[in-house]
Image (cartoon, rainbow, N blue to C red):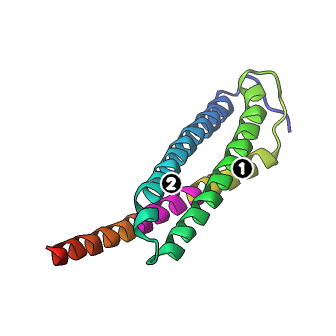
Amino acid sequence: MKTIAEDSELESELQELYIVSNHWLSDIHFAEDEMRFFKQVINKYLVTHTENNGSDEVKRFNEMIVQLAATALSLKNKISHVLKVIEPFIKGKDDKIGLDLIEKFAALETEVKVLFESVKQIKKSLFSFTEELMRVDCENFTRQL
């Protein structure tokens, strides 16, 4: 399918796809920061406080974070590829757009949403687990007094 260079609606749609894709990259960088924070929480607090109690849970959190990090890396690569495909259209260097571009974009949108939902769930679970450990520590400390 050929596009007309003067089609301003198409041009603005492509620019929007480009902007959204770049925004996703920023969001993924934020998610990676969140994952680094989760690892710090695990390494600085949970590992030392769960030697006998809850170590399976800590292991599960670490495994989920490793999986999410791999997903984030894969998404960054896919988004970078889409950006490379979109860029020539925005610069007016290419005049053929395939339906696969829209399909890739829609699939990426779903994957980004899934990544952030997973980060949200890990955060919620990790914080609940940490709060429970802190509550137990406080109870144990109070009993020792």
Q: Is residue 24 left or right of residue 70?
A: left
Q: CA distance from mark 1 to mark 2?
A: 20 Å
Q: Identify the image quadrant of the N terminus.
A: top right
Closer-to-camera residue (11/104): 104
Sequence order check, earlier mark of 1 and 2: 2
Q: Which residue is mark 1?
A: 74
Task: Judge the density around disc 1: few (<14), some (14-19), many (≥20) Cα neighbours within 10 Å.
Answer: few
Tell me which corner region of the image, top left, top right, bottom left or bottom right, holds residue 63: bottom right
Q: Is residue 69 left or right of residue 90?
A: left
Q: Residue at x 80, y 48 (%)?
A: 100
Q: Residue at x 84, y 34 (%)?
A: 96
Residue type at mark 1 is Ser
- Please identify the dominant SS of the magenta region: helix
Q: Secondary structure at mark 2?
A: helix
Q: Position of residue 48 (x, y in %)?
A: 43, 63
Q: Residue at x 74, y 50 (%)?
A: 104
User: Can residue 117 be found in the magenta stretch?
Assistant: yes
Per the rendered image, the range of residues in magenta is: 114-126
Closer-to-camera residue (103/56): 56
Q: Which mark is residue 39?
A: 2
Q: Position of residue 81 (x, y in %)?
A: 76, 39
User: Can residue 11 be found in the magenta stretch?
Assistant: no
Residue type at mark 2 is Lys
